[in-house]
Amino acid sequence: MPSAKPRAKRTQRRAPREAAKARIGDVARAAGVSTATVSRALTFPDRVLEETRERVFAAVRELGYTPNVAARQLRAGSSKTVLVVVGKRRNPPFFSEVLRGIDVALAQAGYSVLMGNLDVHDENTERHLVDLVYGGYIDGALVLSNAVPSFNGRSIADSGVPIVAICAEADGPNIPAVLVDDEVCSRAQTRYLLEMGHRYLAYIAGPKGNYNESQRFPGFLAEMAAAGLGPADFVRFEGNYDFASGVAAGEAFLKLDRRPTGVVACSDEMAIAFMKTIRRAGIRVPEDVSIIGFDGIEIGDYVEPTLTTIRQPRFALGSTGAEILLGMIKGGASPRVTVLKGELDRRDSTGPARVRGEPRSASQTDA
């Protein structure tokens, strides 16, 4: 039978300590359980009673404890595996090249890739990813989203495993990110159309709440303002980065009494689908409407007319993120944010605005 003295120690709370100094024994004492129970609650929470699990998680948060994954791997050996988490994004053509950059960089270093997909969202998926990280099955994680997997109070951001975000800043403390400057690129899109004389534009947006959209729309607005233009000089179509959004925007465009002459799309998929939709209705591109996309996916080189776009360094985004993560796994420091440059690729879908008085196409005359 345990003595009264150990019981008194178990219920004693300690003052919060720095995350680097808190140990599993501190968590055990604060929660009034054994170290084995703490380990089991963090690694296999379903095997621990809910009331006990909640006490353990509360102690973890209070003390700022993170599991010593490095020590665990020294005992068990490195897994040589990196978890790659793809977020809730509907733009597979864009991410295919990012993933190739990740795979090449990791393969050269002798690492394997384990994919996790948050787009197929259910509790089992997210719990599985969290369990993999806390169970010591991976050496690091790359997150292609601002959403970081979490389940039942546990986030991989708190696991002590090195994490790097790619394409968006992640929700979590001090997670390094590899980005393209979305606002700068959006301003370049808009400026290019304005320089060609377009003064009434359309903007096809990304999903509300999306990190990249939160950077691109302000860039569009800033460039419009710099040209002396405001809300009356553009129309916004909501989108989701996918082909369906471009079709919907095109159909909405065709119903307008006053149609923009230039279109800024936040993805190539939306730009291509928009272009196809309005061309089927007899609108000429770029004679009647100029369209510029964002991403630089391969299909933009083969549509008619070829798509003017912001070409993101997709392979470099993936490979750079992977190289930073490998350095962190080895114990090295990492830059907080690494910004790569996008490039304006001028193709055939953009041209000068039609001069006032110039004959319109038959479809526009009938509008």
Image (cartoon, rainbow, N blue to C red):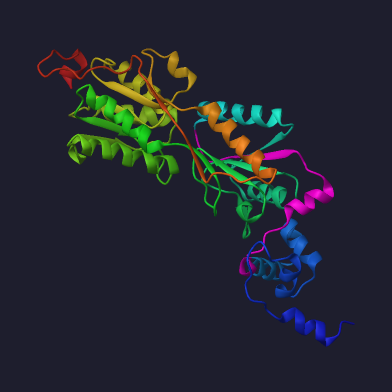
Instruction: Name the side, left or right, on which 250 lies relative to 30.
Output: left
Q: Image quadrant of residue 226?
A: top left
Instruction: Name the side, left or right, on which 347 lies relative to 38.
Output: left
Q: Indicate yes or no whether the magenta region holds residue 63.
A: yes
Q: Position of residue 273 (x, y in %)?
A: 39, 23
Q: Indicate yes or no whether the magenta region holds residue 62.
A: yes
Q: Is residue 272 above or below residue 326?
A: above
Instruction: Name the side, left or right, on which 238 lies relative to 1.
Output: left
Residue extending furthest toward the bottom: 4
Residue extending furthest toward the front: 332
Instruction: Name the side, left or right, on which 165 lies relative to 162.
Output: left
Instruction: State the residue in front, 107 or 350.
Output: 107
Quarter of the image where the C terminus is located: top left
Q: Position of residue 345 (x, y in %)?
A: 38, 20
Q: Is residue 12 above or below residue 148?
A: below
Count of residue discs: 0
Q: Position of residue 155 (x, y in %)?
A: 62, 55
Q: Position of residue 92 (x, y in %)?
A: 53, 29
**Which residue is located at x 71 percent, y 58 percent?**
67
Region of the chain picked out in magenta, as a range? 61-90
